[in-house]
Image: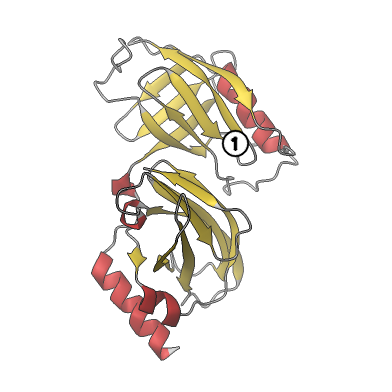
Amino acid sequence: MKGKNFLFAFYILALGVACDHDHPAPTGVDIYGYWRYESGLIVEGGDAEPGLNPVAHIQLDEDGTLSGFTSRNIIGGTFEYDSLGSIDLDIQMMTRVADTPWSGRFTQVLEEVDRYRLEENRLTLINPETMEEYTFLRMSPDACRPVINDERVYREISSDEFQLIDANVVGPCLEVLIGYGGGCEDDIGVALIGSGAYAESLPPQLAIKIVVDDDDPCEAFIRRTYYFDLTDFQYEGLDELILRLEGFDEQLLVRY
């Protein structure tokens, strides 16, 4: 445990707290990019408790294409918007993983909204009939925590107990939803460590793992989402990488 704490402290000290369409945005802020769902959608009997939202996001590209993740399915389509605050999201494709009430309603919401409000790092989509608002937060490398890619650290560091609930690649970042025992502290220490050794395949593969330092003495089950910048994992000269996350059954494909 002492060795784990030393390495984790080293990690934290080294990385710090880091955690055109022809229509300009009304505030002059760019609408394009990755937007993580934050709040506004409550479904009774759904797969999320109040205040504990599933992993979901949308990506708006400059060529008018829309893509995203509903917490169960990948979606694709197109979008249009204007400088007066109107927006039209058209879902044209969705994978067919068994859905849930929450993620099914999330897709429906995207097609119901037709107004938006844009601030620097916040996109609010508005249903004109009900006036319900759905908030998305901008994702960028600046919002994602740095990582360590080191064979010795990967081999020797250990983790306190936690539950890996979900993981998803969101643009340049890895989004992970974990559960842990806590409730007394605002946050705990969470790090993403790469093994430093790439498997020789196309694309190459890299083993990674989440490490948690949970000093919170309380035992309530807390769910929290963390984001990690995947830039430092890129294999030199190649623009794709497969990540094998310890404790997660699916391989994660990263495109740089």
Residue at horizontal 49 percent and vertical 17 percent from the top: 78
Position of the N terminus by quadrant: bottom left
The amino acid at mark 1 is Thr
Of residue 245 and residue 107, the one placed in the foreground of this image is 245
Position of the C terminus by quadrant: top left
Residue at horizontal 41 percent and vertical 38 percent from the top: 137
Q: Is residue 60 above or below residue 102?
A: above
Residue under pointer 1:
70
Residue at horizontal 39 percent and vertical 83 percent from the top: 5
Res. 43 visible in picture: no
Q: Is residue 209 above or below residue 78?
A: below
Labels in figure, total: 1
Coordinates of residue 85 in the picture (x, y in percent): 38, 13
Coordinates of residue 205 in the picture (x, y in percent): 47, 58
> Of helix, strand and loop, which one carries label 1?
loop
Coordinates of residue 253 in the picture (x, y in percent): 49, 47
> Dot 1, how many residues are within 10 Å of its Cα: few (below 14), some (14-19), or many (20+)?
many
Q: Is residue 203 above or below residue 219?
A: above
Coordinates of residue 157 in the picture (x, y in percent): 43, 80
